[in-house]
Amino acid sequence: MGSQSIPLSRRSLIAMGTGALAVAACAPVGRASNELAVYKTPTCACCTAWVDHMRAAGFEARISELPSLRSIRSTQGVPEALASCHTALIGGYVLEGHVPAEDVRRLLAERPKAVGLAVPAMPLGAPGMETPDGQREPYETLLILEGGGTRVFARHG
């Protein structure tokens, strides 16, 4: 009887572990899709304004300040040519620069095979780059493809 309880116990543990993994695999679809990890330098005010934009759109943001963002960008596969003033991670994707919340929602809904989104060059009028006089520049949100290429994901302005 003792020898039978060990295999039964192992089977039970395997079944429970498999069930827990299934629950964990489903969890990111709901809650994690709103959790944003933001990396910025300590002195950047426009990054804080972008975080405010994202929070107003329903995202939960956790901010980490770093002296340089080069290593986080490199680790996440963001080409240096797309570098901006902050980098964020959400739902398995990277966001570089002043990406609008609506584009992030679309990215998370469509789930393309990609590294993430970027709005390079800090265009006036992008979220966090608003001006008192309302000046806006047209800009594009780029989809960062695996391997470093890009394609236009959305156009604004």
Image: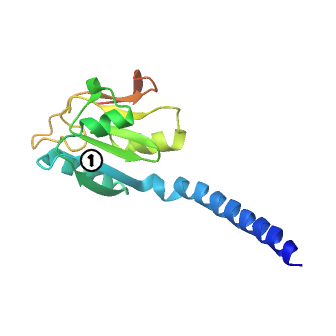
Toward the viewer: 132 or 69?
69
Taking 63 as reference, is 1 above or below it? below
Q: Residue 78's x, y, as percent?
A: 34, 31
Secondary structure, mark 1, is strand
Residue beneath label 1, please?
Answer: 39
Taking 6 as reference, is 63 above or below it? above
Q: How is the image coloured?
A: rainbow
**The N terminus appears in which quarter of the rendering?**
bottom right
Taking 1 as reference, is 83 above or below it? above
Left or right: where does residue 7 sit relative to residue 119?
right
Residue at (60%, 56%) from the top-left corner? 26
Q: Residue 38's x, y, as percent?
A: 29, 49
Task: Please say whether residue 154 is visible from this viewpoint.
Answer: no
**The C terminus appears in which quarter of the rendering?**
top left
Toward the viewer: 154 or 48?
48
Residue at (42%, 22%) from the top-left corner? 151
Q: Residue 57 occupies which quadrant of the picture?
A: bottom left
Residue at (41%, 43%) from the top-left corner? 104
**Mark 1: which amino acid?**
Tyr
User: Tag 1: Cα neighbours inside 10 Å, few (<14), some, or many (≥20)?
Assistant: many
Q: Residue 42's x, y, as percent?
A: 14, 50
Task: Please say whether residue 15 is visible from this viewpoint.
Answer: yes
